Amino acid sequence: MKKILNYINGEYCEPFSGDWLDNYNPSKGEVYSKIAYSSSEDVERAYSAAKDAFPSWSNSTIEERSNILMKIASLIEENLDSLAEAEALDNGKPLTLAKVVDIPRASSNFRFFAHAITQFASEAHESVGLNTMNFTIRQPIGVVGCISPWNLPLYLFTWKIAPALAAGNTVVAKPSEVTPMTAYLLGDICTKAGLPKGVLNIVHGTGPSAGQAIVAHPDIKAISFTGGTQTGEHIARTAAPMFKKLSLELGGKNPNLIFADCNYEKMLSVTVKSSFANQGQICLCGSRIFVEKSIYSKFKKDFVEKVKKLKVGNPFETETNIGALVSRPHLEKVKSYIDLAKEEGGKILCGGNQVIIEGSENGYYLEPTVIEILDYQCRVNQEEIFGPVVTMMPFENEEEVLKMANSVKYGLSATLWTSNLDRTMRVSKQLEAGIVWVNTWLNRDLRTPFGGIKSSGVGREGGFEALKFFTEAKNVCIKYD
Ligand code: NAD
């Protein structure tokens, strides 16, 4: 059976423990490969390679680093089909989605930061009258840690690694143990692109073992983490006494506010996507739908009709809209929320059941589910489900919908549908979220700051924000006569 090995010092290697984790194919519910079960010894080995590689990498020219990142981007593009197939097999997402979103974006991440680093400037402040000149230099931190989740595996893994490398750091990275395959394949691509040995080290294994070892390592000075809020809390507690720099991109329970004055047809088709893309397993999915009362009945009917047409099926079939959920435990968690919704008085408008696909009877398939709720404070409307499940309820006015939208502990993103410019401004300013989309969803310009507030995290990634995170600012003040 295929083994997913660590990639350390430019070479694939087995874990010290000699132990392996099972890697499941969610569309079949079968083990199809084995993952290195790494421990602190493997992380130490990765750290040591990264430490040795740092002096040379951090002193390379911007052009040298940029060229290598561009080569990685090109190689990802050249291998788009095989990487997309690997992603669909490992994660259960539709192959079509992996081909148009995940893998192209992984390539864009490298290409974007290859360019961004060439434009990343430092500031200078002259104190006229005091005869001093200040200039700020931004230096790479050293060895940094990048830890990513399973929902957009290569997309989010590279979203961290690319700026870290561009800024001159060396990296110890860990992808999710639920979806490690494309991160494993990235090692080979980096070697082919000429990335020097030890600059990027990829360690596989569980959060409590390999992940914890990265976070607890005293000389890994910064951690960029994307994952669940509870894990983020744990990481913050571990890292705080060592004063590590932290970027935490955590969970969400994003509201979708639909006003009667919106472009209805556009809203309807985008809302189907923002609810169920990637089986609803995107931290930015609009899982709480609030609809202005005057169009609520119409929306309910039209939306449910469209959702019922979504095809749940094998990720490798082109007509599939909804693939498999990522794992058995995740499927069980999502189903438990559907049961809870019923207990809480929610009405299942469509979906709610596991789907058995012929030939893939053990796969983790679930119908896209729409739940009409009575109270915005019910648990199903407050807690992150992270699956193909949305709630909906009507609202009377702006004030009421803002109260409902802001009632959760999360604050990642929000979507607003209206053609009223005054309302756009008023509501955008009052929404408690790091990102607000108006009349669109998941429209990303990689230069923009990305991240959440409240329990959705701290820090921003994207554009120069990411390069700032992965560098330390040092001010040099010169007195002249
Ligand atoms: P998770 O927190 O279980 O795991 C994320 C990563 O952290 C994995 O690589 C895991 O092995 C590792 N990990 C777990 N425990 C650890 C520990 N103690 N120390 C160090 N590392 C540890 O999250 P998940 O289930 O993989 O992903 C789903 C979550 O990610 C959802 O909550 C989702 O909202 C969130 N997410 C957020 C964003 C964002 O940008 N804000 C993007 C995608 C996903």
Image (tube, grey):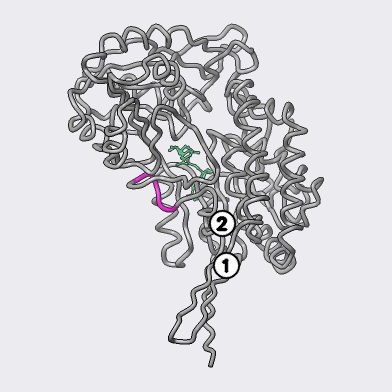
Q: Nearer the viewer, residue 184 or 410?
A: 410
**Which structural element holds mark 2?**
helix
Q: Residue at label 2?
A: 467
Above or below 135: residue 307: above
Q: Residue at label 1?
A: 138
In this image, 383 relative to 36: left or right? left
The disc placed on residue 223 is none
Instruction: Give the spatial CA distance, label 2 vs label 1.
Output: 9 Å
Residue 239 locus on image (x, y percent): 45, 61
Q: Is label 2 within 8 A of ligand 1 (CB to nearest ligand atom)?
A: no
Q: Crowding near pointer 1: few (<14 within 10 Å), some, many (20+)?
A: some
Q: Nearer the viewer, residue 121 or 35?
A: 121
In this image, 26 relative to 82: left or right? left
Precedes in sequence: disc 2 or disc 1: 1
Hey, what amino acid is under mark 1? Arg
Q: Residue furthest front?
A: 129
Image quadrant of residue 336? top left
Image quadrant of residue 192? top right
Q: Crowding near pointer 2: few (<14 within 10 Å), some, many (20+)?
A: many
Residue sitting at x 31%, y 12%? 299
Whether residues under marks 2 and 1 lie with C-beta atoms below 8 angstroms apart, the answer is: yes
Secondary structure mostly seen in the magenta stretch: loop
Hey, what amino acid is under mark 2? Leu
Please give the range of residues in magenta. 455-459
Residue 433 locus on image (x, y percent): 35, 41
